[in-house]
Image: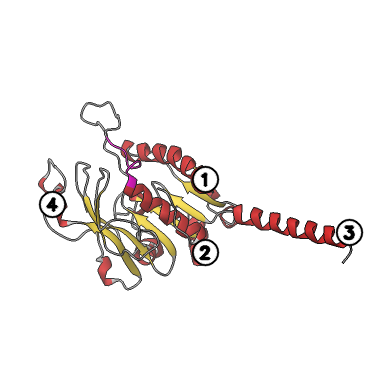
Amino acid sequence: MNVISIKRAFALCFALLCFVNVVSAQKFKVIAFYTAKEDQAHISFVHEANKWFPQMAKKYNFSYDSTNNWSNLNEAYLAKYKVVLFLDTRPEDPAQRKAFEAYMKGGGGWMGFHFAAFALDKSAVPNNWDWYHDEFLGSGQYGSNTWRPTSAILRVEDRKHPATKNLPETFKASPNEWYRWEKDLRLNPAIKILASIDSASFPLGTGPKLHEIWHTGYYPVVWTNQNYKMIYLNMGHNDIDYEHKTNKDLSHTLGNPVEDKLILDAIMWMGTGKKAVGK
């Protein structure tokens, strides 16, 4: 091999190495949908999330976009993204619902927070999307909640899942309004419960109504449907100063190191198949 051939070979190897590095450094894309029009507690979380996720995206090499235009929930738009987030609500338009279902059945990733799973007959958010609430989430409609928003001790039920394998056995979650659901998720073979309320949390809630304080029971708060690349987290309702009509934040969801790690490892699992590191 002459000198020119050797130089060409080195140049080719260098070009291939650069190409591999560029490909490996490519970011996966996350899109968050939100409404942020109802309940200051949910609006507060949306604003918090839309500040926090861009910071995490820079640190963990993914890109983060957000939109309150639900008409973007269509096949062409979703094709650009590896992971979809629902920060506070769900789509109501039949075409948007159909596009989201196709996206998930096609292997897309999804993370939903708190009110994104809410549905209740004869309410402003009716129980009228069977695939989403009964099959995909498996929870059915809303049952009840604790009040006021308080921290809870959560027990990690599955420490082998990529989203939870690096969490402690129990941890203290940020203050939240905790939900109870119509269906018992333990009876659904497709559902893997990742975290639930630990009995050390009881009594959970402060009232003033007695039924808003939980003393016993089993309450899943983080789970995945094993037929999809998804995770639902009941977190996402900040405590707000309603009593003095200031609407000021009294708590935040993000910034809790263990809870943050859960969210980030879940995002990395859906986007790359790997866990986040260093958080």
Question: Looking at the image, is mark 1 or mark 3 nearer the viewer?
Answer: 3
Instruction: Please tell me which residue is depicted at 13% across the width and 48% down the height of the picture.
Output: 213
The residue beneath circle 4 is: 202
Q: Earlier in the sequence, mark 2 or mark 4?
A: 2
Question: Looking at the image, is mark 2 or mark 4 nearer the viewer?
Answer: 4
The residue beneath circle 2 is: 102
Mark 1 Cα shell of 10 Å, populated few (<14), some (14-19), many (≥20): many
Where in the figure is residue 77, as x and y percent of width and height? 58, 52
Q: Amino acid at mark 2?
A: Ala
Where in the figure is residue 252, as x and y percent of width and height? 31, 38
Q: Is residue 124 magenta?
A: no
The residue most toward the bottom is 189
Mark 3 Cα shell of 10 Å, populated few (<14), some (14-19), many (≥20): few
SS assignment at label 2 = helix
The residue beneath circle 1 is: 64
Q: Earlier in the sequence, mark 1 or mark 3?
A: 3
Instruction: Please tell me which residue is depicted at 50% across the width and 55% down the height of the picture.
Output: 83
The residue beneath circle 3 is: 4
Image mark for residue 265: none
Magenta segment range? 251-257
Instruction: Please tell me which residue is depicted at 44% across the width and 57% down the height of the picture.
Output: 275
Which quarter of the rendering shows the N terminus? bottom right
Q: Amino acid at mark 4?
A: Phe
Q: Is residue 223 visible?
A: yes
SS assignment at label 4 = loop
